[in-house]
Image (cartoon, rainbow, N blue to C red):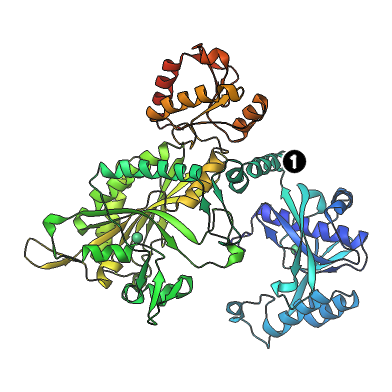
Amino acid sequence: MAKHIHEFTEIDAMRHSTAHLLAAALNELYPGTQFGVGPVIENGFYYDVKTPKTLSAEDFEMIENKMRELAGRKLPFTRREMPIDEAIEFFAGRGQTYKVELLRDLKTRGTTNLKEEELQDFDPEKPLVASVYETGEFVDLCRGPHVTDTGKIGAFKLNKIAGAYWRGNSENDQLTRVYGLAFATQTELDEFLRWQEEAEKRDHRKLGKEMGLFVFSDLVGPGLPLWTPKGTMLRETLNDFVWSLRKAYDYQRVTIPHITKKDLYETSGHWAKYAEDLFKIKTREDHLFAMKPMNCPHHTQIYASEQRSYRDLPIRYAETTMVYRDEQSGELSGLSRVLSITQDDAHVFCRVSQIGQEAEIVWNIIQTFYNAFGFTLVPRLSRRDSAAPEKYLGAAEDWDKAEQALRDILSEKKVEWTDGPGEAAFYGPKIDFMAKDSLGRSWQVATIQLDFNQPKSFGLTCVNEQSEKEQIVMIHCAIMGSFERFISIAIEHFAGAFPIWLAPVQVRLLPVSDAFADAAMLFVRRLRAAGIRAEMDADAGTIGAKVRKSETEKIPLSIVFGQKEVDGGALQIRVRGVKEPLILSADEFIEYAVKVSSERSA
Ligand SMILES: [Zn+2]
Ligand SMILES: [Zn+2]
């Protein structure tokens, strides 16, 4: 749901006016309907109502028709001001108990908002007026703004119905929330509906299941995906790719346990700050341990195990490993929100003077990696809010140097980037990368995060040229961040049709019948020996069923295998998404498959 702190734009006013139009229609169709609130949300609006008859999606058409009829009458939105007591009486007279409750709040607290922070300017002595808006017969308590009349409302469509407690409190009445979409034109609405349909088809929860990548078990629990052999193959392919890029820049692999004494997080400050997000473990000796929610504190202890010289730096540790965060079960969803998160994590320990060089290495890795998926990246420089220097940790001159180093890379790379004043973490500036997917959605993906805080908490130093201990800086630089989230984005980006280099199964042999299974398996072995991820569909089903299954699972290359193929005839290769089959000899095909799978292109 959209936040309401943003400025009310023209489209917002139109969407909100459509909420009034919905309420006016319900008021005519179902006399006695009581109205809650009707705010603007992303792409539309909703209205919380209590109707005498239970509403369902089947009523949408009739309600929309009524809305259209009222829109056609070009009813003006007329604003009127009433002293608050008169307004209370007015809405009470119409049986609008929820509006009366809002008005009473307005009278006693100066706001209908339940949050305390809005109370500051309230002067109980000042006589209060309430603004109401009339649209034909329907009168609503509202601050506005609206369009001038219902004829100015664009294209709309009711799209969802759900239960909602009055003011979000489960002890209050349950109301019906009717959702609608609203756009300036019918074309925009149609475009959005097409886009939404496409997004639903690509939903990674649906596709991930069809493709057999991961499963959930009620016994293991929600938010804890179990990766099948295929899903694990996909993860390994991604991991190998990231590691091949890091290895070229002298990263070293390290390995840490998944739990720690609480002391580690007390020193880092995480215990105090993120205690709620930690999975805690009590040992048999009654000591408190925690599952790691991040890897950096552990990695610092490998660095801190020796006194480092400036000559040793930079030191670059990489590790792909799971972290665990205790989230509310209601917030878990597919791979987007999980309790067990696999990170392709890395930490660079370096001097402030080396930030530029190290950040550029991470940048290059990020760019190569995301290019292979066809994602367009837009970086953002997340820097200090210069008006509030006290919010940030570390010396101002180190911040200046660090921000300058990041700025230099941004201008060197000659890419479009956005400026994010005030977006830095309190412990350091960063570059955040936004990736645009094939549906035009933006996702925050990789970051290059500088950190002055953990080196300070853990006393990480190097001995410099003057033989003095100098505090170093850490760079957090996961490339995918979370495998789970990245894979969910990649599935939706490709609609499950992974490029050959990434597909967990690259080639599938479809024997026409059992009689050809052995020969097909021999060919599978030849392909595997050449480094191709190949398998055979040994099911008893018809060849038509096997072809369809191959299509559903988005296998890039499928080969029907029968007598002709056994006799050494040319192979007919079905290439995913291509109508005409590819005709190649067995040897030519192996060469072709090796070549296309080694080119990491989207
Ligand atoms: Zn309004
Ligand atoms: Zn980290």
Q: Residue at x 13, y 58 (%)?
A: 310
Residue 129 in view (yes/no): yes
> Label 1: which residue?
186
Quick check: 413 above or below 146? above
- Residue drawn at the location 58% of the way across and 31% of the way down: 538
Q: Quadrant of ligand 1?
A: bottom right
Horizontal placement of 250 versus 509: left or right? left
Q: Is residue 505 left or right of residue 169?
A: left
Asked whether 117 or 262 is in front, the reply is 262
Where is residue 546? Give x, y as percent. 63, 29
Q: Nearer the viewer, residue 580 or 179?
A: 580
- Give the image quarter of residue 592: top left
In the rendered image, residue 574, in percent from the top left (x then y), is placed at 56, 22
In x, y percent, where is residue 171?
Answer: 74, 78
* 406 with respect to 95 (left or right): left
Q: Amino acid at mark 1?
A: Gln
Category of crowding for the residue at label 1, using alpha-carbon neighbours closer than 10 angstroms: few (below 14), some (14–19), many (at least 20) = some
Residue at 81 percent of width and 53 percent of height: 150
Residue 423 x/y as whole percent = 42, 61
What is the quadrant of residue 455 in the picture? bottom left
Where, quadrant-wise, is the N terminus in this rendering? bottom right
